[in-house]
Image (cartoon, rainbow, N blue to C red):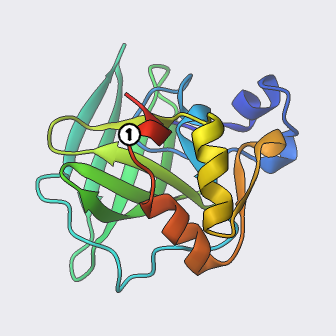
Amino acid sequence: MSYGRKAIADRGRPAGWGGRLILAGLLALVLAACYEVGEEIVDPGMAEEVPTLPGRYSLGEGAFTVITDQPGSNDYLYQETDSGGEMSTGSFRAIHLRDDLYLAQVMPGDGGIFAAFFRHPASWSLILLNTTPAVFDLAPRYHVEIDADMADILIGSRRDILAFLTAHTTAHLTE
């Protein structure tokens, strides 16, 4: 799932925002699958192991993502190869929220920090955000502002943003 500069520019957003998420496929859907955050929200001590996550995930049409764990930490590296053979890399940390739902802090190799949700082990795919009034009603409860004009950027303290993200339920996600 690449956040390429062209994909963001094509959606009418400035290319300088440099979409930078690369996390297991669905290029066309990725922009709808995460929030951009201004700083790390999951520090190494908070990151959790995701059992059975490392592996190779087919994205269809020859595209795939390889996820590897980092010995001695709960950080993961990913390498995505699109159907044209172009490769992107980055890292991420995850927090288990409930059942099979995880929150990932994604740090693409070309910069930026993003927050996304995924399910595992039932599948490996990002869950799309459902930025309906329910999400915008949830944000102020945690003193978070969503700048929806610029790629769903979250504005607030690190602690408040993390609380907002962990409060997401199925009403806030599209599956």
Quadrant housing the C terminus: top left
Residue 51 found in image quarter: bottom left
Q: Position of residue 54 (x, y in %)?
A: 20, 53
In the picture as drawn, the residue positioned furthest to the left comes out as 52
| Residue corresponding to mark 1 | 170
**164 or 89, which lies in front?**
164
In the picture as drawn, the residue positioned furthest to the bottom comes out as 45
Residue 4 found in image quarter: top right
**In the picture provided, is 29 more to the left or to the right than 65?**
right
116 to 174, vertically: above or below = below
**160 or 6, which lies in front?**
160
Residue at position x 43%, y 44% in the image:
23
Q: Position of residue 126 (x, y in %)?
A: 40, 38
Badge 1 marks a residue whose secondary structure is helix
Q: Position of residue 131 (x, y in %)?
A: 61, 36
Residue at position x 44%, y 59% in the image:
167
Residue at position x 45%, y 81% in the image:
43
Residue at position x 50%, y 60% in the image:
165
**106 or 70, which lies in front?**
106
Number of marks drawn: 1
**In the picture provided, is 174 more to the left or to the right than 110?**
left
Tell me which amino acid carries mark 1.
Thr
Please tell me how crowded label 1 is: few (under 14), some (14-19), or many (20+) other residues with Cα within 10 Å: few
**Residue 131 in sight in this render:** yes
Q: Position of residue 128 (x, y in %)?
A: 48, 33
134 to 147, vertically: above or below = above
**Residue 110 in sight in this render:** no
